[in-house]
Amino acid sequence: MSPAEKRSPLFHQLVVYLLFLILLLPLLGTLVYSLSTSWSATILPSGFTFKWYVALWSDARFLAAFGRSLLVCFGALALALLLILPLLFVVNYHFPKLDGVMNVLILLPFAIPPVVSSVGLMQLFAAGPLPILGTPWILIGCYFTIALPFMYRAITNNLQAINLRDLMDAAHLLGASTWRAAFMVVLPNLRKGLMVSVFLSFSFLFGEFVFANLLVGSRYETLQVYLYNMRNDSGHFTSALVISYFMFVLLMTWAANRLNKDKS
Amino acid sequence: MKSSISSKGWALLCLVPFALFFVAFQIAPLAWVASNSLNTPQGWGLGNFQQAFSSPFYRQAMRHSLEVAFWSSLFGIVIAIIGSYSLRQVSSRLRDFVMAFSNMTSNFSGVPLAFAFIILLGFNGALTILLKQMGVIEDFNLYSKTGLIVLYTYFQIPLGVLLLYPAFDALREDWRESAELLGASNWQFWRHIGLPVLTPALLGTFVILLANALGAYATVYALTTGNFNILPIRIAAMVSGDIFLDPNMASALAMVLVGLMTLITIVHQWLLRRSYHVAR
Amino acid sequence: MSFLHIRNLHKSYGPTQVFTDINIEIGQGQFITLLGPSGCGKSTLLRCIAGLTAVDGGQILLDGQDLVPMPPQKRGIGMVFQSYALFPNMTVAQNVAFGLRMQKVPTAETNQRVAEALELVELNDYAGRYPHQLSGGQCQRVALARSLVTRPRLLLLDEPLSALDARIRKHLREQIRAIQRELGLTTIFVTHDQEEALVLSDRIVLMNGGQIVQSGDAETLYTAPADAFAAGFIGNYNLLDADAASRLLLRPVNSSVAIRPEAIQIGGLGIEGTILSHSLLGNVVRYRVEARGVELLVDVLNRSAADLHREGQSVSLAIGADAIREVA
């Protein structure tokens, strides 16, 4: 380390702690609010309690919303896996030139904000052959497009790392058909990429609000919509809700990290 | 390698379900919006766009979008630069922890974030009261453009750090050592080597942050219950809600937003190719 | 008075001692190699001389001036890194000119000296290229030109050839040595490759575990290694412990013994042995021979195919008394 680097490591530590503090503050505020009896125009709350959490987790409407969110997210992920895995295999094995096209296509969900898509979606699926507006089905379809970039990227990297072509050639030489080779050889090796992308997509989808609010709203109340609808309720209650949601997502991320580390 | 016609045929068949869903939920809505933006009461034409750019109300929405996006991206990237640079200099334990935490907080956007900020910085928020007592601020309106910029800056930071840290990490130590032996001071190193090498990554990140802010809907909607005049809110208000519905006008505004986003994406892809830490 | 005098230098990272009590004297214009296995401290020593790593004690006297309190910018030392360390945002010419820019040399003179330096490394046609457009060998030559153009008092090279392939390595090391001789530049070269050290250096400093094991010219280090480690590191010595040596030579031997493979002759009267196998190393044939229960490597010049000894063949080995070197 050059003498210049030795200059004030303490300074850098302070900066990093400050960064941590800035990021922590809103979360901390919400946590304290969810645990306090009342906290109006004062700096600190007046007392501490768990009653808001009790009220939350015994509320049928909350549990229903939670369940609906889980259903839609898992449904979308299942659909995504079903559609994307064959796609990835075909592109990487048979049509490598399509990869360039795919890389452009997966930019679309980023370049086109959900608000914009919603305008079209509301008109296209309100009536006609597929009147799925207002049902969870339209959400599953939209969430699939959101998960697409995450999953495509992560699994493509994984496929390139395991050298798909060589694996398939070896399997063919040993007598396996393409289908069997794909299932028995390629799929198990994709676990890491799959895990990472599934958990990443899940966290993102679980916090999705735009599609949920505009396309479905209260007709199929998911967690984020429920949160918004409860805004005029007690702030303590909504804070407990926010913290519970965040804790759940944290749990999923932690589980993903653990799985990731175990595999590598 | 077996590559008969039938196996390629099967392969193409596997692509069909994906294509169907992708077209239905991504391409078709975009196509509808694009074509209907040209659908005016007077027939097909650019009337909607003309109205969008001449009406003060719509122009205010665009202006607000650009201002909030610009300032939150600027503050966000400055904080991310300082943070990333320091993160590189601290122990790996502290670095891994703070980076993991930063990635986690990127899940904390949208409605939950708006509520958290109301608790802290609303009219009776703990932080508002603290800062007033300390005399730092007179009054703080979270529900204004300034408040929105503060809120947006918050969720820009983790994204900025995520994108910038690899660029700082790619600044090789032996470049600095080489420069030192050739007589460069710390400042000269940054001026001639460090900053030029980082610039594509810095610009690329700034541009992504702009896109991130422009498309954001949930946060501002939850904060202002849809009452702040900004592009995403304006667009959504014209296709849902109880009052005045005009999907064609909404489409025109949506295309303006898409235009901005596309421009940004192109610029970003170009900058990415010029970055030194991206494998060529 | 030597040009570079390193006195009682030591360095530790916390509880780990990297090197202790290092004393080296180098005359002006000499080419010295620091040789040793990975982790022996040679690279750290080099970085301490450059000022990139701080020392814990001792002096580094260059032309009478102690470098230890000076920052790297002021030491007047050039250094070539294993990873080339070329600035990616600058062309070859701009890279080479960098040191002169820092010294605020006027533009006309800078351009001339840069052209001369590029001429020296045979890269004048590449002045406008960027590092990512160059091969490894070309990058290293640019790095060399960049360190030489500032006319440093001392040139340091930290395993500059390790990342290159064999053919380029040989060519480049000759070029480095030729340039060094032409400029009369005092040079310290760090490597773990003993062949490089033997070919290039006026003097070799062999290090192990942070200590200097032996210091001397190539001939001395090769024919008279100081201890078992030195014998094992340089050349392909047969290292025999005292028991094996006693069995082989039929006389009591007190310590370990090192015998060079080319010092054992096949033919004539002597020790009976059997050929176990042979390897063709190009101009040398290396035999594995078993004699009196001891396995030996014997090197013979590859004069003709007819002289090749078969596996299982009985041969007679002669080992001259001066070929047997006792090592600790």
Image (cartoon, coloured by chain):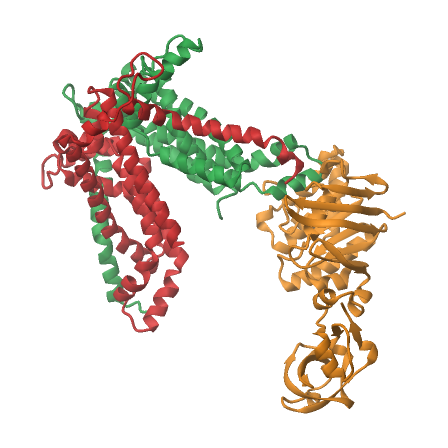
Residue A235 pos. (x, y %): 24, 20
Task: Tell me, yes or no, if residue B142 can be seen here.
Answer: yes
Residue B128 pos. (x, y %): 37, 14
Residue B45 pos. (x, y %): 23, 27
Q: Nearer the viewer, residue A109 or B76?
A: B76
Give the position of the C terminus of chain A as an image quadrant: bottom left
Q: Nearer the viewer, residue A212 or C3?
A: C3
Q: Colour of chain B?
A: green
Q: Is residue C248 above or below residue B33?
A: below
Total number of numbered labels? 0
Residue at the right extreme?
A: C1
When asked about the image quadrant of residue C245, the answer is bottom right
Q: Which chain identifier belongs to the orange chain?
A: C
When asked about the image quadrant of residue A72, the answer is top left
Q: Is residue C34 left or right of residue B170?
A: right
Q: Nearer the viewer, residue B100 or A162?
A: B100
Q: Colour of chain A?
A: red
